[in-house]
Amino acid sequence: MDITLEDKNSLREVLKQCRLSVAGDSSVVNRVKSKLWEVISETPYFSLGFYLPLPGEIDLTDLISRWLKDNPIRTASVPEITGGIMNFNKWTPASKLTNGIFNTKVPVEKNFVFPDLLIIPCVGFDKKNFRLGYGGGWYDRYLAARNFKPYTIGVSFKTCKVPTIYPVQTDIPLNLIITD
């Protein structure tokens, strides 16, 4: 079945509203964070990329701060788009932040890294672990450009699962999706 960009954008808007309706439920959010902690606390990776939340996204900063504190050689980073390219800029709980593109927050100090593990927010997702994001393709282009592919974990709510997101050739499935 062919789906138009307009149809995909409509799906995205419905899923964003669905996500917003659940994001305020602390018990649901805490279940997702607990499941994510079970995975990342035992991970063999030492460099993690995650996101600073936009409305409706789960705030993982406390979880990532704990992950960093548990092992001082670990590093965390957040996405930053400059010059039309997404890279990951080193982040710590003490990082001073400034406004980035698309109302995101990014560290003032620039120290770009290549994380081994990415935690990626999902507007929606499907049974094949394809992620629906905001429609810019930033994560897919980042992953396609890497010689070494990081392990990818999507974070979402189970109510945002759909039978298919109608992936296109440039969409890259995630290794794992964690929900409530």
Image (cartoon, rainbow, N blue to C red):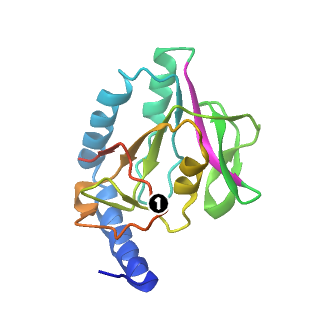
The amino acid sitting under disc 1 is Pro
- Above or below, comparing residue 30 to residue 116 in the picture: below
User: What is the magenta segment's predominant secondary structure?
Assistant: strand
Give the image location of residue 142, x and y in percent: 59, 50
- Front one among 5 and 9: 5
Quadrant for residue 42, please give it.
top left
For disc 1, the marked residue is 55
Quadrant for residue 141, please give it.
bottom right
Give the image location of residue 162, x and y in percent: 25, 66
21 relative position to 134: left or right = left
Q: Residue at x 50, y 14 (%)?
A: 71
142 relative position to 163: left or right = right
Magenta span contains residue 177? no
- Front one among 144 and 58: 144
Q: Quadrant of the N terminus?
A: bottom left
Q: Residue at x 57, y 33 (%)?
A: 115
Identify the magenta region: 74-81
- Above or below, comparing residue 67 to residue 52 in the picture: above
Q: What is the tally of numbered marks visible in this picture?
A: 1
Quadrant for residue 33, please give it.
top left
